[in-house]
Each structure stands twice: as C-alpha cells, then as structure tokens.
C-alpha cells in the first residue's frame, strides 16, 4: 500500500488557500475590466 | 509553403512523436499508464490541462469567428477562473482523497454502481463523438495546404498521436502537452507580432483597432439578458461558469490531468494556473483574428475562403452572375480600403462621421457579395450550406506569412490538435478500462494484463475518433459542434456531482433519476426553445440538483441509503 501524500502541503506565495482564491478572483475581475476598457477605448 | 516551412513542420512532427515515445517508457502498472504514477508537478499538470483544452479548433475556428463576427466569443471563458476556485474547494479534494482513476469512480463510492456507469457512459458517448470533430479540424488545414484528401490528413494526424499515447500513456500525454503548450504560446506571440508588422506603412495598431471597432469587432461586453444570444456577458459568466465546472470537474479528459499531481496542493495549483492564463491567452488568439480582418483591408481576400468550394463555384455558377458578384466584391473591397484609410486619418476630425458611413456601406456591400457567392454555392451543393469560417486563418497563414513562420504556425495548429487528442484518447481508454472492463469483465487480473488491455482501448478510441472525423465535415462550424456535444451532457453530470458533494442527504436513487430528468429537460429546451447553448449547462445542473433532492426526500423519510463516508461526502453542516 503506497503512502498517501500530505494534503496540507505549503501554499506558495499566498500562504493560505482563501488568499490565493481571492487573488485569482480579483485578477479575473481585473482582466475583465481591462477587456471592457479595450473594447470601449476611443482609438 | 516554402521548403523551410515544410522542414519546420516535419521536424515538429518527428520530434514530438519521438519525445512522446521516449517520455512514456517504463510503464509497468495502470497507475503509471493512466496517472503518470501521480508524480506531476503543478506547472506541468497545469500546462497539460491547458493544452488538453486548446484544440486546433481554437485556432482554426475562433480566429475565423473573430474575423467574421469579432471578439464576442471571449465571454465564453469568463466563468472559467471562478469555476477553478469552486472546483479547488469542492470536487478536487474529494477526488484526490478518494484515490480514484476516474471521476465516475467517485460516484460509486458516494452513490452506487449504476450512477457511476451511466455518467461514465455519457462521457464515453459525448467525448467519443467530440474527439472525432477535434481530429477533423486540423484536417481542414492540411486539405487547404496540401490539396490532400481529408481522409489522408485525418489518418496522418490521428495515427501519429495514437502511436505515442498507446505506448506511453499519460506520461507521454502530459510531457508532450508541456512541450506543445510552449510551442502554442510561441506561435500566439508570433501571430500577433506578424499581424501587427504586416500593417501598411502609416496605418498603425491604433488605426487597425479603430477600424475594427466600426463593425463591432472589438465588442466583448454585450450586457443584454437575451437568452437567445449565444455570447453575452451573462451567458459567459453564468453559462460559462457551469460549462467550465462540468468540463474541468466532471470530464475525465481534464480530471485525469490534475489527478496526476503529486499532492492535492499541486493538483489545485495546476487548475489555478489556468485560471490566471486562459482569458489572456484566448484574447490574444481572437485579437489575431481581428488583425487578420484588418490585414485583408489592404490585401485582396478571396470571394470564398475554401479553395475547393471556390473551384466548384467557378465551374458550376452561371458565368455572368459570378462575374457580376466578383466585380461587386472587388469594388466593395477597394471602397472599403479607401474608406478605412480615410477614417483612420479623419476619425478625430469633423469628417469622421461621413468616413464612418462610407466605410460601413462598403463593408455591407462586401458582405452582401460574399453572401451572394454563398447562395450560389448552396444551389450548386443542392441546398447544403457552406461554412467558410474555418478556412480563413489557415488560408492567411499559408499565403501571407513569411518563410518559416507559416510552418511554425501550422506546427502550432498540429500541436494544439495533438495535445487535445492525446488527452482524450487516454481518458477514454481510462474510463473504458476502469469503469467497465475492470468493473464488469475482469475484476482481478495482473498489472501486465490490465496494461495490455489499456493499450488496446487506447488504440480502439484512436481508430474510433478517425472514423467519426471522416463524417464530421458536414456538421457546420466545428467550434460550436464540439461545444454543443458537451453542453447536452455536462450540466446534468455536473448536477450529479453537486448532489454528491454538497448534500449528504442525496441518495443514489435521487442522483440516478435526477440525472435522467436533467438530460430530458436539456433535450426539451434544445428542441423546443431558442435558448442559447451555453445556458443548457445551467438548466441541466439545476434540474438534476432539484429533481435529485426531491427524489431523495421522497425516498427517505428514513435514513440515507448508505453510511456517510467523510472522504466522499460533505459534512451535514456544509
């Protein structure tokens, strides 16, 4: 029987999972805002 | 294509097959063959997840869509980052801790055998069909370039992928995915850079975007709530969220990629890696299509992009009518070019509105001439409509890119196709082997036997995909065909997984009948309403969840159907 790897390996950079999820969600919203700006920019 | 282009393409094909065979050596157990011995790092698993999702259709279809309709398709990916977060907090830990090979195995642990079997069968049906379409798209590219039959190109593409997946299994799949993803990123940057560099002197990127905006080619954020429109902000955020949840959470071709992570953390990070990169990458691909659209303001586009159909048109259409259409098309193109340059010069001056109107009139005339040609072709083809979108980008690549770069971009299209195909062959074989053969046919055999059968299944699915691909040519816009296949089932399967992890009171019977009611509802919605296909996922998932809960509640005024297992069920307070 193989030993199961630990589930709680260190989370890089952000240290906790809620923080990394918040960073992903905020970056997604930021990208969408940039795209809205791109679509409406008066070139 | 120059000899240098052929050399680039040839080197890619030989090298990737050789690399796949080399990386896949040493398989002894099905853990090696199906899950790369669960030793993949997050970045490799993440690139593999990304490569499996990007098919050749992404390049051939979406650049064509951007050329004809603009960038509105981008909203399709808006729900993806949020789906990744939901999956990392829900399904991924359950899958990982249950130590499963397939997502559907988990459903037997949580519910019962028939729920597992039905969902796995649905995966085999929908993925088995769509993998054929995935294989068909690059054959379009090769048939345009080489003048080969689609049959030969399908067999070349399918055969080379089958070779290394049959031998190396998931290790080959994932490590070739990593290389292919690097090539794809390189190709995307090359395409954007070349498209910008090819703009005429005095007509810059800002001018191009200003002209593209005139025909709403840059429109991304359509905020209307019209459920019949395929790509609105809301269909992307809500429908796209459910589609991504279904695809990444319940489709074995993706689940298998991140289950190969060496820890739960690595598996989660591989998905979050995609959450960061997917939308920007798709934006660059669509931007390429828009820039190609602007490029053809200054170079003569063909009346019909598909060269074979153009030959048919020249041979079968009334000569006078075709000549009139052609001269109208050429005149409209010249007028559009002049109007575009004028608008670029005068867009901040008083004459801008007049320049805009003359540009739009020329564009309408050009589109009308193309529509006339399409109608003539439809008559020649005895009423069968011709979809030209998928031929735009490959035609541009082979006729307008400089020596060597055309070969590179064609290699990118190959890489995109092969990375998707390889993952799908491997996952179809895994579901066939683990959910059916190992479950019902031979429940206890040695590693060598299971490994051999796994290779046979892989070869079978490869050959099956080739067979479907040979029939896919008349199915319409390839990109939508693939996504439609998924949309009929993904939402309903997602509903079953939601029942599994979100509520401990859901019973096996509730899940099973909920699944049937979800699929029936999606069928009825698709058959009798004009609701856009992205919403099917929401309808399917919601119906299964609600129906499943009702059946479960009716079933047990008594206890749950089996004891609660903390590895497979959310706590009652969840």
Image (cartoon, coloured by chain):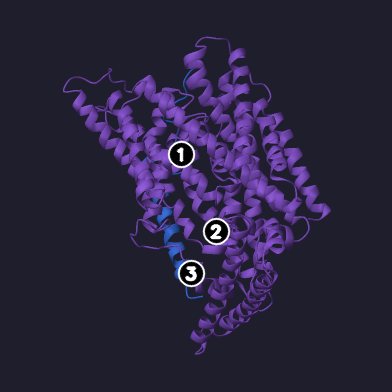
Q: Quadrant of the C terminus of chain B?
A: top left
Contact between marks 3 and 2 (CB within 8 A): the answer is no
State which tag comes first along the sequence, 3 or 2.
Answer: 2
Mark 3–mark 2 Cα distance, whole angstroms, equals 13 Å
Q: Which chain is blue?
A: A
**Residue lying at 75% horizontally and 51% vertically, measured from the top left:** B147
| Callout 2: SS | helix
Q: Would residue A25 be found to the left or right of residue B282 on screen?
A: left
Q: Would residue B282 be found to the left or right of residue B177 on screen?
A: left
Q: Do marks 1 and 3 share a subunit?
A: yes
Residue B216 — which label?
A: 3
| Callout 3: SS | loop
Residue B194, located in which quarter of the rendered image?
Answer: bottom right
Chain identity of mark 3: B
Residue B545, relative to residue B168: is it above or below? Answer: below
Q: Nearer the viewer, mark 1 or mark 2?
A: 2
Return the residue nearer the eye: B537 or B412: B537
Residue B248 — which label?
A: 1
Mark 1–mark 3 Cα distance, whole angstroms, equals 31 Å
Q: Quadrant of the N terminus of chain B?
A: bottom right
Q: Which chain is purple?
A: B
Chain identity of mark 2: B
Residue with the mark numbered 2: B65
Mark 1–mark 2 Cα distance, whole angstroms, equals 24 Å
Residue B568, located in which quarter of the rendered image?
Answer: top left
Q: Nearer the viewer, mark 1 or mark 3?
A: 3
Residue B327, relative to residue B23: is it above or below? Answer: below
Residue at the far left in the pictured view: B557
State which tag comes first along the sequence, 1 or 2.
Answer: 2
Contact between marks 1 and 2 (CB within 8 A): the answer is no
| Callout 1: SS | helix
């Amino acid at each position: 029987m193989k030993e199961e790897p630990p589930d709680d390996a260190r989370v890089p950079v952000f240290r906790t999972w809620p923080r990394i999820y918040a960073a992903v969600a905020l970056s997604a919203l930021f990208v969408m805002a940039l795209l809205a700006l791109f679509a409406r920019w008066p070139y | 294509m120059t000899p240098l282009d052929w050399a680039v393409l040839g080197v890619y094909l030989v090298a990737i097959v050789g690399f796949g065979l080399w990386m896949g050596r040493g398989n002894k157990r099905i853990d090696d063959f199906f899950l790369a011995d669960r030793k993949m790092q997050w970045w490799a698993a993440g690139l593999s997840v990304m490569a499996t999702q990007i098919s050749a259709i992404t390049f051939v279809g979406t650049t064509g869509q951007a050329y004809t309709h603009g960038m509105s398709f981008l909203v399709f990916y808006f729900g993806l980052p949020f789906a990744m977060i939901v999956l990392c907090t829900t399904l991924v830990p359950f899958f990982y801790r249950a130590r499963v090979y397939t997502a559907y195995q988990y459903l037997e642990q949580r519910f019962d055998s028939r729920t597992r079997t039905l969902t796995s069968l649905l995966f085999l049906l929908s993925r088995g069909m769509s993998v054929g379409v995935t294989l068909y798209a690059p054959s379009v590219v090769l048939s345009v370039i080489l003048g080969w039959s689609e049959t030969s190109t399908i067999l070349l593409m399918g055969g080379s992928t089958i070779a290394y997946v049959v031998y190396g299994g998931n290790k080959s799949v994932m490590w070739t995915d990593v290389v292919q993803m690097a090539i794809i990123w390189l190709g995307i940057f090359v395409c954007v850079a070349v498209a910008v560099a090819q703009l005429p002197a005095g007509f810059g990127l800002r001018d191009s975007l200003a002209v593209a905006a005139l025909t709403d080619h840059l429109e991304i954020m359509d905020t209307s709530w019209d459920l019949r429109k395929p790509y609105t902000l809301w269909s992307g955020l809500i429908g796209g969220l459910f589609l991504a949840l279904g695809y990444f959470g319940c489709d074995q071709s993706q689940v298998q990629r991140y289950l190969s992570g060496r820890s739960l953390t690595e598996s989660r990070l591989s998905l979050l890696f995609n959450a960061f990169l997917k939308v920007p990458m798709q934006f660059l691909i669509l931007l390429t299509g828009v820039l190609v659209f602007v490029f053809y303001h200054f170079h003569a586009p063909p009346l019909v992009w598909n060269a074979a159909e153009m030959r048919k048109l020249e041979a079968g259409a009334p000569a006078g009518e075709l000549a009139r259409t052609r001269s109208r098309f050429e005149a409209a193109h010249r007028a559009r070019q002049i109007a575009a340059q004028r608008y670029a010069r005068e867009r901040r001056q008083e004459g801008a509105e007049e320049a805009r109107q003359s540009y739009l009139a020329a564009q309408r005339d050009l589109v009308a001439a193309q529509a006339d040609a399409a109608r003539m072709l439809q008559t020649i083809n005895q009423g069968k409509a011709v979809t030209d979108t998928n031929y735009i980008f490959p035609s541009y690549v082979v006729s307008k890119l400089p020596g060597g770069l055309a070969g590179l971009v064609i290699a990118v299209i190959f890489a995109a196709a092969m990375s998707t195909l390889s993952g799908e062959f491997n996952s179809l074989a895994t579901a066939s082997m683990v959910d059916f053969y190992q479950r019902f046919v031979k429940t206890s055999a040695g590693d060598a036997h299971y490994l051999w059968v796994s290779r046979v299944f892989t070869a079978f699915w490869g050959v099956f995909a080739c067979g479907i691909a040979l029939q896919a040519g008349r199915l319409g816009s390839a990109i939508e065909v693939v996504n439609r296949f998924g949309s009929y089932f993904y939402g309903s399967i997602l509903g079953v997984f939601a029942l599994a992890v979100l509520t401990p009171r859901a019973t096996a019977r509730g899940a099973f009948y909920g699944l049937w009611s979800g699929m029936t509802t999606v069928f009825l919605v698709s058959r009798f309403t004009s609701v856009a296909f992205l919403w099917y996922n929401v309808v399917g998932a919601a119906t299964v969840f609600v129906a499943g809960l009702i059946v479960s509640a009716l079933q047990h005024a008594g206890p749950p159907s089996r004891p609660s297992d903390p590895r497979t069920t959310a706590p009652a307070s969840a």
